[in-house]
Image (cartoon, helix red, strand yellow):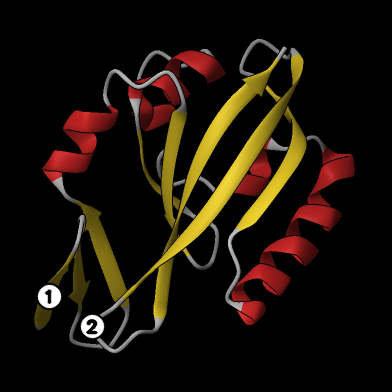
């Protein structure tokens, strides 16, 4: 890793090839550990780098390793994926927070509706490098 910078709740790390990697600060993990809402952190390509315990429980996983490293589209029902991609791209390009509802498939095969609020975090130059989703299960 060649460079790192702290930005509020995140540590932004750039490797020698200029790829941006990031880690969620332990304060955020600790504060989100017992949160009712799910928290998902990922890169701009849609790959998940961290989740809190609420997401693990909501999905029905035994631990976060069943989720981390996967693309967020893997969890959406197929009919929702095209719309999700279009909205994600528009949100990134327009620099806007996104609020939406999607249907997801849980580990046990059950389909549920969720409400997602997506925000972006930026590196020290103000460039977006990742997303954080706040997820609520709609009953």
Determine which quarter of the picture holds residue 83: bottom right
- Estimate the x, y position of residue 69 in percent, counting from the top left: 42, 47
- Give above or below for 16 relative to 75: below
CB-based contact (under 8 Å), mark 2 and mark 1: yes
The residue under label 1 is: 5
Q: Residue at x 79, y 49 (%)?
A: 81
Which residue is situated farthest in the right direction here?
79
- Whichever of labels 2 and 1 marks the residue nearer the N terminus, that label is 1
Please give left or right for residue 136 compared with residue 138 in the image.
left
Q: Residue at x 44, y 41 (%)?
A: 40
Quarter placement of the N terminus: bottom left
- Estimate the x, y position of residue 75 in percent, counting from the top left: 65, 35
- Estimate the x, y position of residue 23 in percent, counting from the top left: 22, 55
Q: Residue at x 64, y 81 (%)?
A: 93
The residue under label 2 is: 124
Determine which quarter of the picture holds residue 80: top right
Please give left or right for residue 102 compared with residue 8 in the image.
right
Please give left or right for residue 134 compared with residue 18 in the image.
right
Q: Residue at x 65, y 41 (%)?
A: 74
Q: CA distance from mark 2 to mark 1?
A: 7 Å
Residue 112 visible here: yes
Element at label 1: strand
Element at label 2: loop
Determine which quarter of the picture holds residue 97: bottom right
- Could you say which is closer to the camera, residue 136 or residue 83? 136
């Amino acid at each position: 890793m060649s460079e790192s910078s702290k930005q509020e709740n995140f540590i932004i790390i750039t490797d020698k090839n200029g790829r941006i990697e990031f880690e969620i600060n332990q304060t955020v993990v600790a504060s989100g550990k017992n949160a009712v809402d799910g928290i998902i952190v990922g890169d701009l390509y849609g790959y998940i780098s961290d989740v809190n315990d609420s997401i693990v429980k909501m999905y029905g996983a035994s631990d976060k390793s069943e989720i981390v490293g996967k693309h967020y589209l893997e969890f959406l029902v197929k009919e929702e994926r095209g719309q999700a991609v279009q909205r994600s791209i528009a949100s990134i390009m327009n620099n806007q927070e996104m609020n939406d509802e999607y249907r997801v498939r849980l580990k046990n095969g059950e389909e549920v509706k969720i409400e997602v609020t997506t925000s972006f975090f930026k590196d020290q130059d103000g460039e977006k490098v990742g997303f954080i989703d706040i997820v609520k299960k709609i009953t």
